[in-house]
Image (spheres, rainbow, N blue to C red):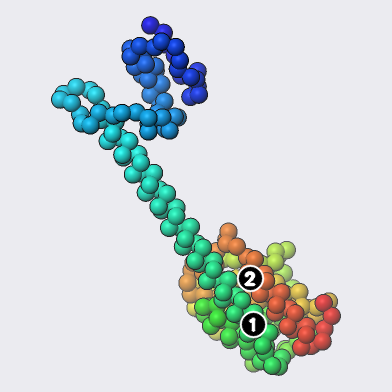
Amino acid sequence: MRKMGREQGANQRVGGALNAGEVVAYLRDNPDFLIRNADIVQHLTPPLTRRGDTNIADLQYYMIERLQAEMGRLRAEQQELLAVSRGNLNNQNRIHAAALFLLDAQSFEQLIQTITTDLAVLLDLDVACLIVESGARDLPRNETAGVRVVKAGAIDGWLGRREIVLANNLYGDPNIFGGAAGLVRAQALIRLHISTETSPGMLAFGSRNSEMFHQGQGTELLSFLARVVERCIRSWLDLPA
């Protein structure tokens, strides 16, 4: 009797005049053959039931079980993909609406109010702040105007060399979010390059939902919104890029 070892590989063609014993011997030597060649299962004719007390397994049961497991996995992946797609579309619509609100501002004061008040509503956040360093030229320095003023170098301290930092499962920093810091469990910090004539700026978004922002999340939409904010500020203050 010829035995074919496991080392012959899953793609070895079993040809020639093999008898049933040789096929059985091969399958015994290669118990994972059907796993490595799952497509062959559809060509098999399995027994309908376990027959008496013999050791003949009902392959139909295992085939159905495997197919059900595969269908369940595919269904779960499909639902996850749909949920992610719906979430991405919803976020995109919110960012686009926020951009239009910024562009519709009728004054610089209204623009600041839109950034610090309306963005939180439009983006389903608990707090939105515009942060400027104390040396910022031409930008409001009065925090009552909706702008939080921080010491020079603070923004680099929070962002390092990064443009956007997302974090969750945290407690908000009062230096960033002021009195609303106690609400914040997730945050997005986005660097603003307003002008060569101004000090660094930053958008800070905070949410009580710890899953609103997290590492690994896409940042393209937040980056787009920051670019809109920069252009709007430059336009109202007549600043160079």
The reply to whether residue 171 is visible in this rendering is no
Residue 229 image position (x, y, % from top left): 70, 79
Q: Residue at x 31, y 40 (%)?
A: 65
For image coordinates 39% across by 44% down, the residue present is 70
Res 224 quadrant in image: bottom right
Between marks 2 and 1 in the image, the one whose residue lies nearer the viewer:
1
Using the image as rendered, state which of residue 105 and residue 39 is in the foreground.
Answer: 39
Q: Residue furthest left?
A: 52
| Viewer can see residue 241 | yes
Residue occupied by mark 1: 100
Q: Which residue is mark 2?
A: 222
Q: CA distance from mark 2 to mark 1?
A: 14 Å
Q: Is residue 201 above or below residue 21?
A: below
Q: Amino acid at mark 2?
A: Leu
Q: Within the image, what quadrant is residue 33 found in?
A: top left
Q: Residue at x 61, y 76 (%)?
A: 96
Q: Position of residue 100 (x, y in %)?
A: 64, 82
In the picture, measured across the screen, residue 166 lies left or right of residue 109, that is left
Query: Amino acid type of disc 1?
Result: Leu
